[in-house]
Image: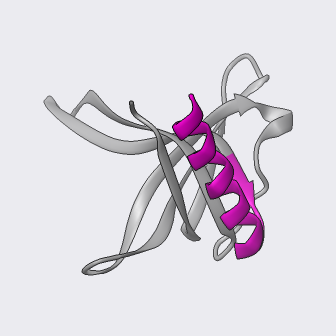
């Protein structure tokens, strides 16, 4: 099962790219999380309708729920890769709200 739940604060710039159809947006950002060795950044990508794109800014508290993926692509004649969290859901809000989202996601994973 490939399910990831990551909570932290938006680090740096949020990039929004609207696709040619005008109806789909790709939102990407780094999420600063606490890890064993100290703070770390998890790249997050969210793809969905432009009207549903989360309104994010640097420092916002976020919980991202989705799956981990590794993409390969060509850059400058070489094959490179990027691992990120492909979010099905991005919840913006205070830590209490994020804890509830994590519990709901954990209950879903256990139950189904």
Q: Main secondary structure of the magenta part?
A: helix
Q: Quadrant of residue 50?
A: top right
From the viewer's perspective, is residue 89 above or below residue 2?
below
Residue 52, x across and y down, in percent: 82, 38
* Viewer-closest of 75 and 109: 109
* Viewer-closest of 89 and 106: 106
From the viewer's perspective, is residue 33 above or below residue 51?
below
Tell me the residue at 53%/39% (across/down). Answer: 110
Residue 60, x across and y down, in percent: 69, 72
Residue 69, x across and y down, in percent: 36, 34
Tell me the residue at 32%/43% (across/down). Answer: 83
How has the structure been colored for display? one colour
Quarter the C terminus occupies: top right
Q: Quadrant of residue 49?
A: top right
- View extreme (front): residue: 111
- View extreme (bottom): residue: 38
* Viewer-closest of 37 and 50: 37
From the viewer's perspective, is residue 14 above or below residue 107?
below
Quarter the N terminus occupies: top left
Residue 6 falls left or right of residue 82: right
Q: Which residues are magenta?
A: 90-112
Confirm whether residue 87 shows in the render. no
Residue 44, x across and y down, in percent: 50, 49
């Amino acid at each position: 099962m490939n399910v990831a739940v990551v909570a932290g604060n938006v680090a740096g710039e949020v990039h929004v790219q609207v696709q040619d159809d005008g109806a789909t947006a790709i939102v990407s950002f780094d999420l600063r999380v606490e890890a064993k060795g100290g703070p770390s950044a998890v790249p997050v990508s969210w793809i969905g309708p432009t009207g549903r794109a989360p309104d994010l800014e640097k420092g916002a508290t976020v919980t991202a729920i989705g799956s981990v993926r590794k993409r390969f692509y060509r850059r400058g004649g070489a094959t490179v890769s990027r691992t990120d969290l492909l979010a099905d859901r991005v919840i913006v809000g205070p830590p209490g709200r994020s804890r509830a989202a994590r519990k709901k996601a954990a209950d879903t994973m256990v139950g189904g």
